[in-house]
Image (cartoon, rainbow, N blue to C red):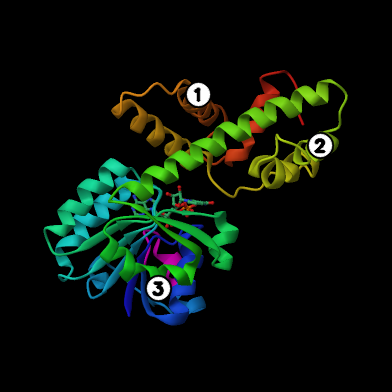
Amino acid sequence: MKIAFIGLGAMGFPMAGHLAKKHEVTVWNRTAEKAAKHASEHGSKHAKTLAECAGAELVFTMLPSSAEVDAIVAELGPKLSRGTLWIDTTSGDPEVSRVTAKRLAAQGIDFLDAPVTGAIVGATNATLSIMVGGTAEAFARAKPVLEITGKKIIHAGDSGAGHAIKALTNSIMGATVWITAECLLLAKRYGIDPRTALEITNAGSGRSNASENLLPLRLAEKQWPLVFKLALHDKDIRIAAAMSHREHMSTPLLNLTTSLFSGALHQLGDNADYIEVAKLVAAMNGDEW
Ligand code: NDP
C-alpha cells in the first residue's frame, strides 16, 4: 500500500520506520533533513514537497497539535484522491478533528483521529496503544496498518472520540504525577528516603504509572530525560479542560491540574520534560530531590 507519513518527530520517526518495513512509505517533514535521514535509514521515499504525498492511499499525520494538522489538511487535502484514508495520530482536539473529518468526507476522504499512548519507547518497539475515533468502516480499514505500529488498537467511538479520550487519560496522568510528587516530598520531610517511599507506595494503594515507571528514575536515580515535552502535555490537559467547559461540567480537579501545568510550563519552559513538574513541586517548598 502507498502510505504518506507527515511529521517525523520523536514519535513519528520510529512509527514511519515500522510502516516502511511492510509498505511503500513516502515521508515529509518540515525540517527536510529528518526526512532525508529517514529515507536513508528506513528505505522510505523522501518527499521534498507536500504535493509528493498526493499519490498515497493512506496518509498519516503525527504533529504537535490539531493546528498544524489543519494547515497540512488545507494544503494537501485538495490534492488527494477520493477513497484516501487519513489517520491523524497527533494528540489533537476532538472538536477540530470532527470538523476536519466532515470537511474531508465531502471530498470522499475518510479521516480517523487515532492518537497513541506508550511514549517514545512504545513507538520504537511498536507496542503503542492506539485509540481511534471515526466510522466502523474506516476503523476496519485502518486496523491492520495500525497493528504494525501498535499492540492494542481500540475503536473509541465516532469522530473525535480518540482525541477526547487521549486528552482525558493524559489529564489523569498529569494530576497523578503532581499529587504523587507532593506526597513523596512530604515523605522526605518525614525522613523517609524517596526510594523507600516509592517502594511502599508501589506495594500499596497509591501506586500508579507515575510511581511505578515515571518517578523512580527521576527521584531515585536523579535522571531527568526529555521523553515527552511539558508543552505537549499542557496542551492535552487544556484540551480536556476545554471539553469540560463546553459540556458545562463541574470539574474542579481538572481545572486545578490545568492551572498547575500551565504555571509549570511558564516556570520550566517549552523544552522541559513533563515529569520535571516534580522539580517544581520541590522548588515551591524550598526543597529539591
Ligand atoms: P516532536 O516535537 O518530537 O515532533 C513534532 C513534529 O511535528 C516534528 O516532525 C516537527 O517538525 C513537526 N512540526 C512541528 N510544527 C510544525 C508545523 N508548523 N508544520 C509542520 N510540521 C511541524 O513531538 P512528538 O513526536 O513527541 O509528539 C507528536 C504528537 O504525539 C503530539 O501531539 C504529542 O502530544 C503526541 N505524543 C507524544 C508522545 C511522546 O512521548 N513524545 C507520546 C504520545 C503522544 P520539525 O522536525 O521540523 O520540528
Establish if 225 lies above or below 205: below
Mark 2 element type: helix
Mark 1 element type: helix
- Residue at which label 2 appears: 200
Where residue 124 appears, as percent x and y from the top left, is 57, 65
Measured Cα–Cα span from mark 3 to mark 1: 38 Å
What residue sits 71% from the left and 18% below the top? Answer: 285
- Residue at which label 3 appears: 144
Establish if 145 lies above or below 252: below
What residue sits 82% from the left and 26% below the top? Answer: 188
Asked if the stretch drawn in magenta spans residue 128, the answer is no
Where residue 66 appears, as percent x and y from the top left, is 32, 47
Q: Nearer the viewer, residue 112 or 37?
A: 112
* Residue 282 sits in quarter: top right
What residue span does the magenta drawing correspond to?
Answer: 28-37
Asked if residue 53 lies left or right of residue 29, the reply is: left
Sequence-wise first label, 2 or 1: 2
Sequence-wise first label, 3 or 1: 3
As shown in the figure, which amino acid type bears the numbered disc 2? Ile
Establish if 28 lies above or below 158: below
Asked if the stretch drawn in magenta spans residue 34, the answer is yes
Farthest residue, direction top: 285
As shown in the figure, which amino acid type bears the numbered disc 3? Pro
